[in-house]
Amino acid sequence: MSERLTIQSYFKPLSQVLDVKDPVWKAWRIMKEHQIKHLPVLKNEKIIGIVSDRDIVQISGYNGGQSMPVKDAMSLDPLILLVTSSMDEALHAMLQKEQHHAIVINTNKNPCGLFSWDGAFQWYLETAQRGPFKFPLLK
């Protein structure tokens, strides 16, 4: 892995964020429209959590779950990476925190994307120095 290679080319750009008071149904609609599985949750313009499609499905089973605020469905303490983070830093942080995704912020500390294992796999397939992949023979 390269220490200088950043995650900048391997995260999914983000055009939407949620306010802590937004209802769960709004999060679900945004995720479906933008084909994403996670959204940062902000309070007073500061990232305080992240909500996933799985969080929404889980909370939707409760009475009035779709109208609950996302603060009741989100996970606290999301992994946050700078857009200039190296691939090594990002992968190490994801492994350390046992996270499958991270919120990417720009130099102004505003959320600008989501980095996940999908991006890491894309990077690996594009940059790894290896011979052709062969499936092992099953016995």
Image (spheres, rainbow, N blue to C red):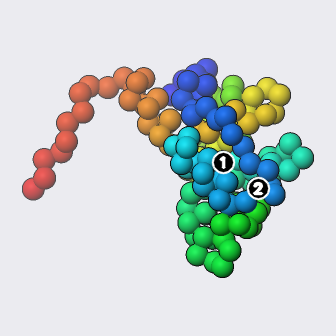
Nearer the observer: mark 1 or 2; the answer is 2
| In this view, 27 is above or below 86 | below
Q: Residue at x 66, y 71 (%)?
A: 65
The residue pinned by badge 2 equals 22
Q: Amino acid at mark 2?
A: Asp
Category of crowding for the residue at label 2, using alpha-carbon neighbours closer than 10 angstroms: few (below 14), some (14–19), many (at least 20): some
Q: Nearer the viewer, residue 41 or 6?
A: 41
User: 74 left or right of 126?
Assistant: right
Q: Nearer the viewer, residue 67 or 36?
A: 67
Visible residue check, residue 85: yes
Residue that extends furthest to the bottom in the rendered view of this protein: 63
Q: Position of residue 22 (x, y in %)?
A: 76, 55
Q: Amino acid at mark 1?
A: Leu
Q: Position of residue 100 (x, y in %)?
A: 55, 50
Residue that extends furthest to the top in the rendered view of this protein: 4
User: 116 left or right of 50?
Assistant: left
Quarter in which the C terminus is drawn:
bottom left
Q: How many marks on residues?
A: 2
Q: Residue at x 59, y 38 (%)?
A: 115
Q: Residue at x 86, y 42 (%)?
A: 45
Based on the displayed image, in which of its 4 quarters is residue 85 positioned? Answer: top right
The residue pinned by badge 1 equals 39
Visible residue check, residue 3: no
Q: Secondary structure at mark 1?
A: strand
User: 44 left or right of 22?
Assistant: right
Q: Position of residue 92 (x, y in %)?
A: 60, 42
Q: Marks 1 and 2, how far apart in space?
A: 12 Å
Q: Residue at x 73, y 67 (%)?
A: 68
Based on the displayed image, in which of its 4 quarters is residue 64 positioned? Answer: bottom right
Based on the displayed image, in which of its 4 quarters is residue 17 positioned? Answer: top right
User: 139 left or right of 19?
Assistant: left
